[in-house]
Amino acid sequence: MRGKPWAVPLRAVLLAVVGAAALAAFVSADGRSEKPAPWPTTCVGLNDAIEMSQGNHRNVGIYQREFGDQAEQACRNEHRGDLSALGSLVADADAAASDGQDADAMAADGQDADEQQGMQSPPAAMTKLTDGVYQYIGFGYVSLVVISGGEVLITDPSFDLRAQALKEAIAELTDAPVSTIVLTHEHYDHAGGTSVFADASVICHVNCQPIFDLFTSPTGDVPEVDQTFQDLLRIDVGGIDVELHHLGPGDGEATTIIYLPEEQIVVTSDLYEPRGLTGGAFVDDKNFTGVRHILNTISQWPLKHAVNAHSLGTDPIDLYENVEYYNDLYDAVYEELAAAVAQSGPFGAFMLQGTLSQTLKLPKYQDWSNYDTAFPRHVDRMLLSIFHGD
Ligand SMILES: [Zn+2]
């Protein structure tokens, strides 16, 4: 398999790697994007996963055996086209399933439907939001890209393979190197890949480093952080004002909200999903009263675009609907908690754990994706957040 294209169409590669269930979760039936399952983050890792899924067990590790230290580079050279197309594939799938606005923007690049379907020519994954400001989607993650006056700021390279694809996409817009990387928070799946941009200064909230110091994961890397901030940092990117706000814990402890006041663009990461509930293990590290506070705060800012780390659409309506959801959830849980405490004292809170989630419902949100499976967990998590503070 070495040296040959992984598969045509590339959708089959994606399926082989992340599995049919993961793709189904990523682009759900109602066209809403969801957090993708973890998947290999290097070319060699992808190749091994594909060979394994096709039963070619002897080919697993072939690059490592033949090229040793140069395995990753050799794989990238031979699969350059595959990687580029694969990086754009998620964007294509998401755009096709979205409500049309962004798909139209992509189609405006001159690709006809056949090309998009067959993936001979990968669709652009870079979408222009306004002059000098873009969002790049690839491998299931969204990055803000700000290009102005010979400077380039990006968010969340995520991991090497994606960072390389992002670098190539930026090179089509400017010769300037990436000068600044802002990490939206400390989670490793967002924070990797910075070394691909050798000249860039990496900025992360001051709470990032203690988490990075614990890094032991085999999935990627964590960056050398060049600059930290506490509550607010203002950056001038060639005349475009970029504000970094820390409004308390959200998803993790180093949650950073990026805001462009002139352009009225906000960027958040892992705080909400369009008409969907975050499920699974990802709920555990979210401070639900913190997320509620952040979403209420930023929804008061003038907004034209709300860029979200795992979905293509930027309509602020998704944010506003989630403000309502988090407020409704908080109110419903708080009411029950206050009644239990009035009756049983502080220990009433403990008695609600694991029981309130069986009875409390918010039918208003029953059509949101993951409601049936994730809502009880949200109730438990909000309860803990209210009476325990985290
Ligand atoms: Zn996260």
Image (tube, helix red, strand yellow):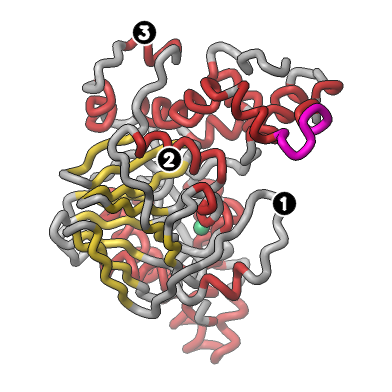
Q: Amino acid at mark 3?
A: Asp
Q: Earlier in the sequence, mark 1 or mark 3?
A: 3
Instruction: Name the quadrant of the N terminus.
Output: top right
Give the vertical position of 249 relative to 277 (above or below): below
Type of amino acid under label 1 = Pro
Residue at the spot x=48%, y=39% of the render?
140
Contact between labelled residues 2 and 1, with CB atoms less than 8 Å apart: no
Badge 2 density bin: few <14, some 14–19, many ≥20, Cα 10 Å: some
Q: Nearer the viewer, residue 225 or 27?
A: 225
**Callout in the foreground (3, 2):** 2
Magenta extent: 64-71
Residue lying at the far right in this picture: please name it.
Answer: 58
Q: Does any atom of ligand 1 lie closer than 8 Å to the CB of label 3?
A: no
Instruction: Tell me the SS state at disc 1.
Output: loop
Majority SS type along the magenta span: helix
Which quadrant of the structure image shows residue 266? bottom left
Local crowd size for mark 1, using a 10 Å CA cut-off: few (<14), some (14–19), many (≥20): few
> Mark 1 to mark 3: distance in Å?
39 Å
Any magenta on residue 69?
A: yes
Residue carrying label 3: 114
At which x and y percent is residue 105? 23, 28
Which callout, 1 or 2, points at the residue further toward the start of the chain? Answer: 2
Q: Where residue 167 is drawn, which disc sits there?
A: 2
